[in-house]
Image (spheres, rainbow, N blue to C red):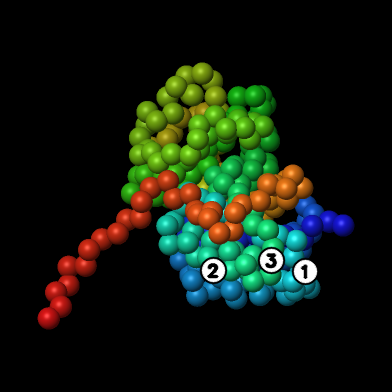
Amino acid sequence: MQPILLHIESSTDICSIAVSKGVEVIGFSETREAYQHASQMTLLIDAAMQEAGLSLGELSAVSVSLGPGSYTSLRVGFSTAKGICYALGKPLITVPSLLALAGGMAKEEKVQSIEDPTTLLYVPMIDARRMEVYRAIYDQKLESIQEAEAVIIDDSVFETDLAQGKHLILGGNGAPKTEEVLTHPQVHFVSVVASARQLVPFALQNYEEGRFADVAYVEPFYLKPPNITISKKKFL
């Protein structure tokens, strides 16, 4: 019997939910406005489950984007995923957000048209304010070349890879703001952002291999501490 998985993507400004049976997505919902995770997530889950024609009790497991990404958004996603797993006794699966995003980028037609796939490097980017992004680098087989890190983008950030003849595929909600800086002809941009659909193949592999997270202790991968500011208002 093919496993039925619920997928929660909450690492960026847009929250999305998918339900899969095996490799097929049978239910999907997504916010239309940014940073509405707390108010919309349970409604999105209900909508995706209704589209799939299933109840939460029929799930085999729940998968959630691990991070890095928005601190608050990741917490909402994890709290929701853990709550479902606790209540229903379902296993929890985590999928690195940048890896899932790279998987989505690899399916783009623009990427597949590059003649020598061995020169490809996927660079998924999640916005981290100003010219900073969370990024990782993967090869054409989606094996890690550079672990997730926070970097400030300038025109020299990829000079070593470009000098080696690599073609860099940039995507995610952090990529558009770098287009004016990264103008090298070997840098290619794809219009792919984080989506719960991208979690499906990775979560399914984890499920089949029995790689589950500890619901009690697992936490999001924030990479950086939250950006907390102190209010300047004075109270009497």
Answer with left or right where residue 133 lies relative to residue 1. Answer: left
Q: Residue at x 64, y 53 (%)?
A: 93
Q: Which secondary structure, mark 2?
A: loop
N-term mark: 1 or 3: 1
Furthest residue toward right: 1
Q: Which secondary structure, mark 3?
A: loop
Quadrant holding the N terminus: bottom right
Q: Are marks 2 and 3 in contact (CB under 8 Å)?
A: no
Is residue 121 positioned above or below 63 on the image? above
Q: Which residue is under mark 2?
A: 32
Instruction: Look at discs 1 and 2 and give the one toward the viewer.
Output: 1
N-term mark: 1 or 2: 2
Task: Using the rendered image of the protein, determine whether residue 174 is visible from the camera's viewpoint.
Answer: no
Tell me the CA gap for discs 1 and 3: 11 Å
Circle 1: residue type = Glu
Answer with left or right where residue 132 lies relative to residue 212. Answer: left
Is residue 21 positioned above or below 159 on the image? below
Viewer-proximal residue among 68 and 168:
68
Q: Label for residue 89?
A: 3
Circle 3: residue type = Gly
Q: Which residue is under mark 1?
A: 58
How far from the left and from the top, in percent, is residue 35? 46, 66
| Disc 3: CA contacts within 10 A as few (<14), some (14-19) or many (>=20) | some
Is residue 178 positioned above or below 116 on the image? below
Q: Residue at x 69, y 66 (%)?
A: 89
Furthest residue toward left: 236
Tell me the CA gap for discs 1 and 2: 28 Å
